[in-house]
């Protein structure tokens, strides 16, 4: 979501005659877009600003802006602790940026913009063309969260749930396709809670399916409680929705899920998986896990390992519980560090083995890859339908092509393959 936000911020700043530069030694303005989901986020901001200060010691001071969820959550502390920072801007106040910059340019006034103005933000952004030209583009359709899992800062930093209108999303999708997008990933903190005038995520996918030029649709991140039957059905009927779903589980223990306020059990989660597999037999899953949540016993942890193995997630994101200030779980007693670390290590070893075993099954198989960019001379990067990274060498330009590739080898990050669709094309494995 920050990637989408950063790209829209750049569109906005054109209004103020600013543009992105790769030359960080000589800039007029720095904008740091931040994430607050786990600890050390604020320290990172001070560290980055420290580096800027050092680089600009003998030069004209650039305007320094801190945007995103760290600004939202800790804006006042940031402004108080570092006078070098000119403004903090929360994720719902980006539309104010041209005004903020003008104020700083004119009188170097410092400011804190951390109101929740989601509707105003998108009203303003809708007036500005989305100039993103990526083959695989993000599109934020929903923001915020009303679920209040006990460990999570999102409801406090991104505010309440808000869904953008159907019409503006179709317009922006058409714009992205016109710019060259062949794949659109619909984004939201709870993307499947999308509801605008009774139009749901399934309706949006069906509508996008009709857009000529669009070849792939994905959505992330979903909450299990919003995996409604209409959405599950679309996985069976849509030709463009990819057969991969990221569905965070957090823990394999219903007791821990309850104490996290996730409001569903393991059985409920596994039923969703079964339903999806029935509708789309080749679907595969990835997930997020929090290891060593306060109160997690050895038995609870073993339940997490059990579900990891039984679902066979092809990718997982796992972190030890990180206590976030202001959340209810911040008040709970932490599990000892050495136990947490051991559990995380064991979890990640098993998850990695599942991932590697799965990747090995792809060798000598055909996969469909949408190529996104050229990474070096005759070397192209793309993703298969399951979001696996694939690298192929080719003398022909593959950017934007969605073609069959035969996988020849893999490492834990990347698959390497040959083009097979058109034998006249000269190519070779990386
Ligand atoms: N809305 C999605 C859901 O409910 O599953 C997840 C969005 S959250 C921004 C992304 C992931 O960050 C979560 O799935 C969770 O695993 C992780 N996360 C959030 N807060 C955390 C915390 N306090 N400690 C460790 N991981 C955390
Ligand atoms: Fe955070 Fe997701 Fe829970 Fe909302 S549903 S509070 S975003 S983890």
Image (cartoon, rainbow, N blue to C red):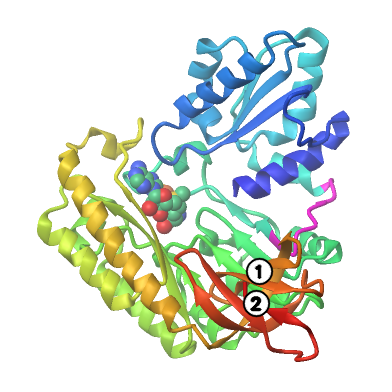
Q: Is residue 68 magenta?
A: no
Q: Residue at x 44, y 82 (%)?
A: 276
Q: Residue at x 28, y 62 (%)?
A: 349
Query: Magenta: predominant secondary structure element?
Result: loop
Label 1 vs 2, first from the N-terminus: 2
Examine the rendered structure and indicate whether residue 211 appears above or below residue 349: below
Q: Position of residue 180 (x, y in %)?
A: 82, 65
Q: Position of residue 353 (x, y in %)?
A: 32, 70
Q: Residues within 10 Å of mark 2 (few under 14, many from 20)?
A: many
Q: Is residue 277 left or right of residue 211?
A: left
Q: Residue at x 76, y 36 (%)?
A: 22
Q: Is residue 89 visible?
A: yes
Which residues make up the magenta segment?
Answer: 127-137
Q: Residue at x 81, y 71 (%)?
A: 397
Disc 1 and disc 2 in contact, CB within 8 angstroms: yes
- Quarter of the image for the C terminus: give it: bottom right
Examine the rendered structure and indicate whether residue 280 appears above or below residue 111: below
Residue placed under numbered mark 2 in the picture: 369
Label 2 sits on a secondary structure element that is: strand
Residue in the foreground of this view, choosing between 320 and 167: 320
Quadrant of residue 308 in the image?
Answer: bottom left
Q: Is residue 131 magenta?
A: yes
Examine the rendered structure and indicate whether residue 118 appears above or below residue 309: above
Quadrant of residue 182 in the image?
Answer: bottom right
Residue in the foreground of this view, choosing between 365 and 272: 365
Residue placed under numbered mark 1 in the picture: 382
Q: Is residue 186 left or right of residue 168?
A: left
Quadrant of residue 203 in the image?
Answer: bottom right
Q: Residues within 10 Å of mark 1 (few under 14, many from 20)?
A: many
Label 1 sits on a secondary structure element that is: strand
Quick check: is the Cβ at mark 1 less than 8 Å away from ligand 1? no
Q: Position of residue 230 (x, y in %)?
A: 52, 79
């Amino acid at each position: 979501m920050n990637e989408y936000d950063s790209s829209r911020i750049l569109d906005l700043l054109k209004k103020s005659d600013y543009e992105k530069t790769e030359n960080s030694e000589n800039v007029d303005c720095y904008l740091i877009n931040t994430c607050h989901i786990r600890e050390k986020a604020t320290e990172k901001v001070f560290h980055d600003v420290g580096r800027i200060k050092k680089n600009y010691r003998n030069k004209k001071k650039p305007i320094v802006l801190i945007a995103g969820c760290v600004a939202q959550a800790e804006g006042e502390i940031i402004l108080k602790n570092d006078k070098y920072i000119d403004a903090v801007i929360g994720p719902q106040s980006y539309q104010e940026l041209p005004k903020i910059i003008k104020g700083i340019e004119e009188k170097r006034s410092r400011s804190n913009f951390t109101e929740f103005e989601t509707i105003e933000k998108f009203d303003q952004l809708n007036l500005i063309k989305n100039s993103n030209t990526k083959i695989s583009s993000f599109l934020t359709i929903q923001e915020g969260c009303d679920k209040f899992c006990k460990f999570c800062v999102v409801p406090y930093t991104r505010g309440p749930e808000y869904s953008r209108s159907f019409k503006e999303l179709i317009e922006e999708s058409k714009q992205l396709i016109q710019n060259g997008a062949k794949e659109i990933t619909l984004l939201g903190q709870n993307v499947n809670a999308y509801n605008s005038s009774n139009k749901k995520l399934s309706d949006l996918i069906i509508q996008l399916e009709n857009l000529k030029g669009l070849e792939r649709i994905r959505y992330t991140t979903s909450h299990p409680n919003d995996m409604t039957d209409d959405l599950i059905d679309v996985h069976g009927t849509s030709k463009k929705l990819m057969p991969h779903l990221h569905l965070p589980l957090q823990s394999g223990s219903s007791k821990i899920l309850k104490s996290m306020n996730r409001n569903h059990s393991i059985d409920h989660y596994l039923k969703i998986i079964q339903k999806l597999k029935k509708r789309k037999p080749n679907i595969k899953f990835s997930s997020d896990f929090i290891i060593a949540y306060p109160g997690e016993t050895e038995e609870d942890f073993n339940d997490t390992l059990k579900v990891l193995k039984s679902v066979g997630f092809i990718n997982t994101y796992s972190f030890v519980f990180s206590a976030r200030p202001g959340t209810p779980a911040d008040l709970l007693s932490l599990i000892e560090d050495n136990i947490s670390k051991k559990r995380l290590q064991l979890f990640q070893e098993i998850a990695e083995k599942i991932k590697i075993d799965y990747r090995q099954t792809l060798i000598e198989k055909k996969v469909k890859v949408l190529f996104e960019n050229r990474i070096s001379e005759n070397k192209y990067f793309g993703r298969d339908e399951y979001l696996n990274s694939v690298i192929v060498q080719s003398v022909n330009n593959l950017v934007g092509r969605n073609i069959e590739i035969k996988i020849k080898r893999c490492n834990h990050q990347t698959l390497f393959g040959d083009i097979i669709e058109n034998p006249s094309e000269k190519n070779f494995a990386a």
